[in-house]
Image (cartoon, coloured by chain):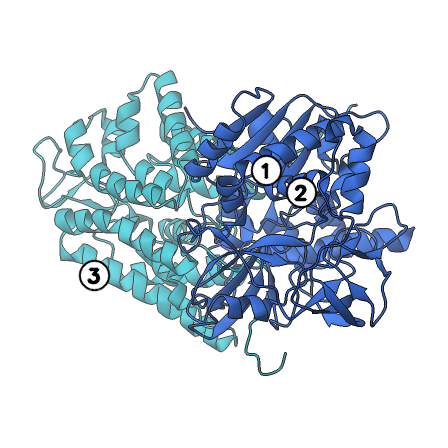
Chain colours: A cyan, B blue
Amino acid sequence: MEGSGLIVSSSPHQHTTVSTPMIMSDVILALMPACLAGVWFFGLKALFMMAVCVGSAVITEAVLQKVSGRPVTVRDYSAAVTGLLLALVVPPDLPLWIGAIGSIFSIAIAKFTFGGLGQNIFNPALIGRAFLLASWPVFMTKWRWPIHEASWMPKFDAITTATPLVLMKYMNIKAPYANLFFGQVAGCIGETSALAILLGAAYLIYQGHISIRIPISFICTVAVVTALFGQDPLFHILAGGLLLGAFFMATDYVTSPVTPRGQIIYGIGCGVLVALIRLYGGYPEGVCYGILIMNAATALVERYTIPRKFGEVKKVA
Amino acid sequence: MALRTFKGGVHPRYNKDATYAKPIKSMPSPGKVVIPLHQHTGAPCEPIVKVGDEVKVGQKIGDSKASLTAPVHASVSGKVKAVMKHPQSSGVDGLSIVIESDGLDTQDESIRPRDNIENLSSEELIGILREAGIVGLGGAAFPTYFKLKPPAGKAFDTLLLNGAECEPYLSADHRLMVERPSDVAAGARLLMKAIGVEQAVIGVENNKPDAISALREAVRGDDRIEIVPLGVKYPQGAEKQLIWAILGREVPSGGLPVDVGVVVNNVGTAVAVKEAVIDSMPLVKRVVTVTGSCVREPGNLMVPIGTLVSDIIDACGGTQLPPKKVIIGGPMMGIAQYTTDIPVTKGTSGILLLSAKEVVVEEPLACIRCGKCVESCPMNLMPLWIAGYQEAGRFDDCERLGALDCIECGCCSFICPSRRRLVQGIRVAKAEIRARRNAGR
């Protein structure tokens, strides 16, 4: 009725308080322990890398949306999440301008060209990393000493060393569990400290933002496959980017299946690929490519794992 | 022991604190009532009184010859002032009978305690319920007599009474169970007799311990009726979910509870059944929860059918904040109204007045494919896909994905962090699919 001022809309009239921007900012919050660990082990350079990557991701998204006449949605924090994740999966000594280019690539190519938030097939941060690895392979595989170094690591020269997976694969040197757990190893900015990652992951699970289906099936599969091939499964869980990838990359809503069964299959697929790349691939680490390949399979996995409708009777052949 | 419940669902804030402990109060007879001739599933009634007629409480004023319908009765005594179209909570202006009350509430002569109840046959019971205009009081207003007759080749083995009351804010059923448990039990026994079963289960969400213990007390010594506490989760009271939770039986897609030998009735309906059979009083009043932050004195009111919502709000002390949304029913499945000049019908379980603070209209954001709608769907559907195909106009795909199985509980839209209008889209798809089917006939 005119003038009544009553809002008429279709039910439900009540909603959860959880919103997309809230989830995204919670992801950023959950990444804080890993960020702090990165700064602790690799110094302020790590912080600059995070700032540059987040800044360029957000600016890229805002500019592209503005130019193309779309609503600017950087306030949903999704671009910031992408930028931050990219910063966490590059080496600490990577020149900042390369980080910026990776971040721009992530948003412009891997996200925006697909149609923006929710439409991209591949995880933008991982596409950014893959792009940088292909473009600047030397920079992307140069590893530095953590500030709080550990005596077990072989010194190549004054500042460089290798990641635990490289040392394992090519020199058969196994990093002690404690160093891997706390993060006193070489590696990407945010991947070295299992403890920090697990703290953040626990927060996301507690908040109900991620289910454990993908990370647990992913990690367990890596453990099982590496054990089957005679390697130490615990080492493979703690070393490299597995934990960061399993809890923060593979669980990316947009690029992983929405079906519960599909999520388990997807996690297992990621795990098999990562283990095989680590064991037999040309790279010592396979988390990035393992997840990206499974991203490509997400639509297919979903299609075959549509839940059985309640009351759906099995068709009699 | 884990409580029995169903798969999926959500946990909305229940917001029942304002009313759940408030005893049912009878509302003073209103000056006039507007009784719609179509307040149930099925065919509308034809008026059988005309302007100027004197009517009494319980007198039949509308009926139909259709097989699926429910007659309507005068809820006050007085004079028929008009037979006219009047706004109604379903959103359409339906033909209604307006009665001006004489304030005496004189009952029709036919209303006197029935004797020989023990000797009533199943058919006679069902006939009484039809004549009394009993419909499901949980909200759907499906004629009760109709679902008590099993289709050929099918039979009932269990009666379920729904006391879940999972809709937030509502407490009408809760109060009935606490205050009139023996009427609920009496209604249950009559319904059991009508459908010829020896087993009944009353399911109540476990957040109503007083209702559970009152009912247990009322059925003590009658081991045919069991009271089952249920998990507190929305939509626990949805028919198929209730059957699954209590009996572990799955109503087949497109089927009815009778396909698994069950009939489900609301506890409020059971009380109405008791009144219709034992007191021979047709359905002329019901309990309505009046609540929401705008209402000065929230409560549970026994109101004559046809009372205007505006009169009921006045009876609750009026409003203390300007309402931004007036909802008939609960916040999950209720219907928002554009006016309070609408009558309470048999299906009106609640009147909810929300203030501007509670009515935040958020624009939908992009779907981030979080999968929460899939996880929460109690029917195991893929809401994001069905709603997506609906937006694209691909109704065949909506149908293939089970749009017609959607029970419109609204869990998907409730849980969506991007506030996408999922169930709203699925409703459009269902309407379109049905329209196409009818057109193809």
Q: In which quarter of the image is residue A197?
A: top left
Of residues A189 and B216, which is closer to you in this image?
B216
- Residue shown at 41% from the left, 39% from the top: A211
Give x and y (percent) for residue A80: 34, 61
> What amino acid is at disc 2?
Glu
Q: Which mark is residue B183?
A: 1
- Residue shown at 71% from the left, 67% from the top: B34
Determine contact: label 3, label 1, CB under 8 Å. Answer: no
Of residues B201 and A311, which is closer to you in this image?
B201
Give x and y (percent) for residue B269: 65, 43
> What amino acid is at disc 3?
Phe
Mark 3 or 1, which is nearer the eye? 1
Q: Mark 1 lies on which chain?
A: B
Whether residue A93 sits left or right of residue A270 in the image: it is: left
> What amino acid is at disc 1?
Asp
Give x and y (percent) for residue B86: 74, 71
Q: Can residue B355 be seen in this view?
A: yes
Which numbered disc, 2 or 1, marks the residue that appears first in the sequence?
1
Q: In which quarter of the image is residue B91?
A: bottom right
Look at the picture and state if A220 lies above or below A77.
Answer: above
